[in-house]
Amino acid sequence: MDTNISVAVQTTDFDIAQEYARLAGDAAIGAIVQFVGRVREQSEAGAVSQMTLEHYPGMTEKVLRDIGERALARWHLHRVRIVHRVGPLQPADQIVLVQVAAGHRFDAFEAAQAIMDFLKTEAPFWKQEATPEGARWVDAREHDERAVQRWSEMNDEP
Amino acid sequence: MDTNISVAVQTTDFDIAQEYARLAGDAAIGAIVQFVGRVREQSEAGAVSQMTLEHYPGMTEKVLRDIGERALARWHLHRVRIVHRVGPLQPADQIVLVQVAAGHRFDAFEAAQAIMDFLKTEAPFWKQEATPEGARWVDAREHDERAVQRWSEMNDEP
Amino acid sequence: MRIFYFGRLRQVFGLGEETLVPPADATVAGLLAQLRQRGGVWAEELADGRAFRVAVDQAVVPPDAPLQAGSEVAIFPPVTGG
Amino acid sequence: MRIFYFGRLRQVFGLGEETLVPPADATVAGLLAQLRQRGGVWAEELADGRAFRVAVDQAVVPPDAPLQAGSEVAIFPPVTGG
């Protein structure tokens, strides 16, 4: 299954057109979902002038790959790609890409959502925001914990 | 609200990078979902060598815009873009793009799914497939009818 | 009153468009009854219980919807885009 | 046994990494008890009921998970990526 999953953790930006181009010409694919998460200029704490993402090298890649494998085991998917940036980012910068290619749209949409929900609650990334009141570590959000319950079958790890 | 909705029905291809670039630098956007539907080489009827999409000019654009407006009324969205191709298409060709930009991922994912479900059941497009047994009009699928029930609030049109 | 046919119905009827005067009762149901009287594929495809939709002025309507001389009518199979 | 700290905990502890011998009972709970004995921010941040996670060899584990001399341990706040 591994050949269908590709993950990357990087300081550099990613290009959604380039990621999409890898799927070009594959006529078994009927549905592609690309999700992009970006830095917002506003958070619960107020204006954000910069965001810095820290991670746990090694474990991050392992968790992302594992999330991809669980998605492939549950839905009919052709390919899963997850790219997450780390380091300093500015408002409007891209943070994360989840790209899922499937035969049908239900699989592609559900898998992309589930991957994001798991990434938000399992992948070892931590955000620190620079605000007018100084630097602030972002708190984990309860609604992300609730969202991940939707996919309870995917919680049963071997 | 209209300025946030853009629809196009066209014979020419669309470019997801170009569509995405329209959102560049907007730091109010935290989540973007791009869905692309493509022609599959296999359908229930077997191998597909070509697909031709017919539509009802005028009504199509009206229905797509109305679907976008209902999504904007229900979710917190910054922008909705729907592009649908008509005419002859080959396997792996792009058929439809739904792009939704929002502050948060739940809104972006749900709205994109709902828009596709409504498009599949309301927008006046008809597919004809060329197969080894000859041309065949694609049948409407019951699971699309069921899928659209998920968004029952959006069915209450004025 | 212009009437358009789309998709499989356009092909089966061998007709994409025609112009008729509104039926006596000026409703969609009256128009469908009139078309069925043509017999053959018309009676077959537009029979009660067959899956087709009618739009008046580009919005799908129920059988009791009114028709006027200037109405734009369309009859088509369930949609299959996306 | 290497121990890593991440995110807010790394900052509060003023420490990203250290090397310790496994605790007497060779469990995560034993290690946490030992760290709390340092007092101050250690006792405070690692108190029962505080939200933090422990990973051993890059997988999140419960408090009764075993530790070995070669274990890679990480202690961190709830994750906030994406």
Image (tube, coloured by chain):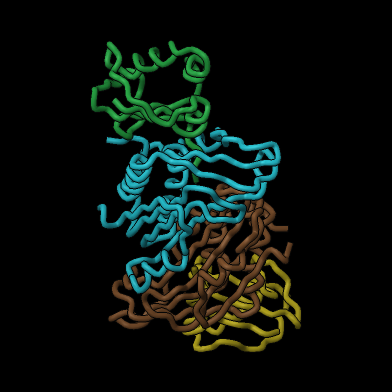
Chain colours: A brown, B cyan, C green, D yellow
Residue at 38 percent across and 60 percent down: it is: B101
| Number of numbered discs visible in the structure rendering | 0
Residue D6, given in percent of the width and then of the height, sits at 54, 80
Residue at 28 percent across and 18 percent down: it is: C22
Residue A90, given in percent of the width and then of the height, sits at 39, 80
Residue at 51 percent across and 65 percent down: it is: D49
Say whether residue A44 is visible: no
Viewer-side residue, A32 vs A118: A32
Quadrant occupied by the N terminus of chain D: bottom right
Quick check: C30 left or right of D42? left
Q: Is residue B69 above or below residue C55?
A: below
Say whether residue A9 is visible: yes
Quick check: D58 left or right of B95? right
Viewer-side residue, B51 vs A9: B51
Residue A12, given in percent of the width and then of the height, sits at 52, 82
Residue at 35 percent across and 17 percent down: it is: C31
Viewer-side residue, C10 vs A48: C10
Q: Is residue D33 above or below residue B89?
A: below
Residue B38, given in percent of the width and then of the height, sits at 56, 53
Viewer-side residue, B70 vs D39: B70
Quick check: B46 left or right of D53? right
